[in-house]
Amino acid sequence: QVQLVESGGGLVQPGGSLRLSCVASGSIFRIANMDWYRQAPGEQRKWVATITSGGTTTYEDSVKGRFSISRDNAKNTVYLQMNSLKPEDTAVYYCKAYVVSAGTVHNYWGQGTPITVSS
């Protein structure tokens, strides 16, 4: 079993910053891609950013230049640094990891951490 636990969410004013963390634990040989998604109220979950095991990053257009995804492979942890936050960034943020274990690959989700951007 693999568990992903996010942290770092909360209430922030427009223009502010937050840093999310997501730690994976359990039966892990290695982790391939790690992603961040978000789900705003009344909307479907949407992809935000991806980082490969080699450190290559990609971003959804609305967060480019404001958000930065990074990872610490030794700690099985992925981060999302969010700057210049806007009210439309309000959502529950989820991490997702593609975990290699016992010769198979499965993807796992965290439980989500809520972010509210409001004055």
Image (tube, grey):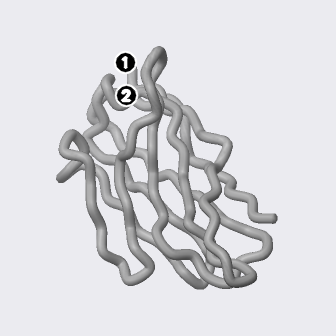
- Above or below: residue 76 compared with residue 90: below
Kindly identify which residue carries mark 2: 13
- Above or below: residue 105 compared with residue 14: below
Q: Secondary structure at mark 2?
A: loop
Question: On the picture, is 67 further left or further right than 34?
Answer: left
Crowd rating for badge 2 (residues with CA inside 10 Å; few <14, some 14–19, many 20+): some
Q: Residue at x 63, y 77 (%)?
A: 100
Q: What is the x, y in percent for residue 20? A: 51, 52
Observer-nearest of 28 and 63: 28
Q: Residue at x 74, y 68 (%)?
A: 25
Q: What is the x, y in percent for residue 115? A: 49, 32
Q: Residue at x 62, y 49 (%)?
A: 7
Question: On the picture, is 42 further left or further right than 103?
Answer: left
The residue under label 1 is which amino acid type?
Answer: Ser
Q: Residue at x 54, y 81 (%)?
A: 73
Q: Could you tell me if the residues under marks 2 and 1 are in contact, i.e. CB atoms within 8 Å?
A: yes
Kindly identify which residue carries mark 1: 119
